Amino acid sequence: MADSTENNTQSNNNGTNYGSSNPNMYSKHNNIEADNTRNNAVRNRIIERYPNLGNLKVQVSTGKGNFPIEGALVEVARNHNGNRYVLYRYITNNSGIVSDIILPANPTAESQSSSTAGGSGVDYIVSVSHPSFIGQENLIATIYNKVGSILSVDLIPLFPAGGVG
């Protein structure tokens, strides 16, 4: 996917580009596509373990869902052997959404019995940040086979010293 150094354009998994007028807006995450590529090996190991898939949509807003936040960094991670691995990093679109994040899930059959239903979902850790808002970390999104899950995240604005807040 194209990476424009002029406006720090990044791509989400739908191939839609979202840019920022501030090239240093995400200085520690300025190459999201490269981060996603480096994490392919970890993703592939997880997919081998969980061959079934579900998807996640993350909606980021402020004002109790009334105002979408464009340009928020959404990270999806999984803990494995005591370590946290970031599987995906995406930037929200102008509607504050990252959609169609495909994630491994347990087989549907595991939810059919009361003895295995508790382990039918796979938990992922979602963190959301934006330079103008207080970030949210360690949010749990549970993914089920062939099911679309939606995680709504409400961020609180940062106010400058002496500002309203």
Image (cartoon, helix red, strand yellow):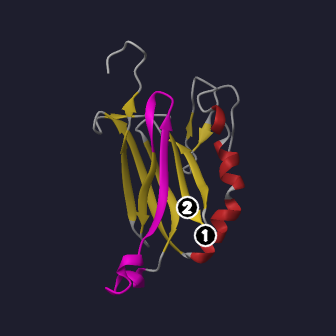
Q: Residue at x 37, y 77 (%)?
A: 118
Q: Residue at x 48, y 61 (%)?
A: 124
Secondary element under disc 2, as helix, strand or loop, is strand
| 32, above or below 126, in the image | above
The one of 115 and 98 positioned closer to us in this rendering: 115
Looking at the rendering, the stretch of residues picked out in magenta corresponds to: 108-136
Q: Is residue 79 left or right of residue 94?
A: right
Residue 66 in picture, x, y percent from top left: 28, 35
Of callouts 2 and 1, the N-terminal one: 1
Q: Residue at x 42, y 39 (%)?
A: 96
Question: In the rendered structure, which amino acid carries the disc numbered 1?
Answer: Ile
Residue 59 in picture, x, y percent from top left: 39, 45
The one of 139 and 34 positioned closer to us in this rendering: 139
The answer to whether the residues at label 2 and label 1 have Cβ atoms under 8 Å apart is: yes
* Label ID, residue 139: none
Q: Quadrant of the N terminus?
A: top right
- Nearer to us of marks 2 and 1 is 2
Question: In the rendered structure, which amino acid carries the disc numbered 2?
Answer: Arg
Query: Residue beneath label 2, please?
Result: 78
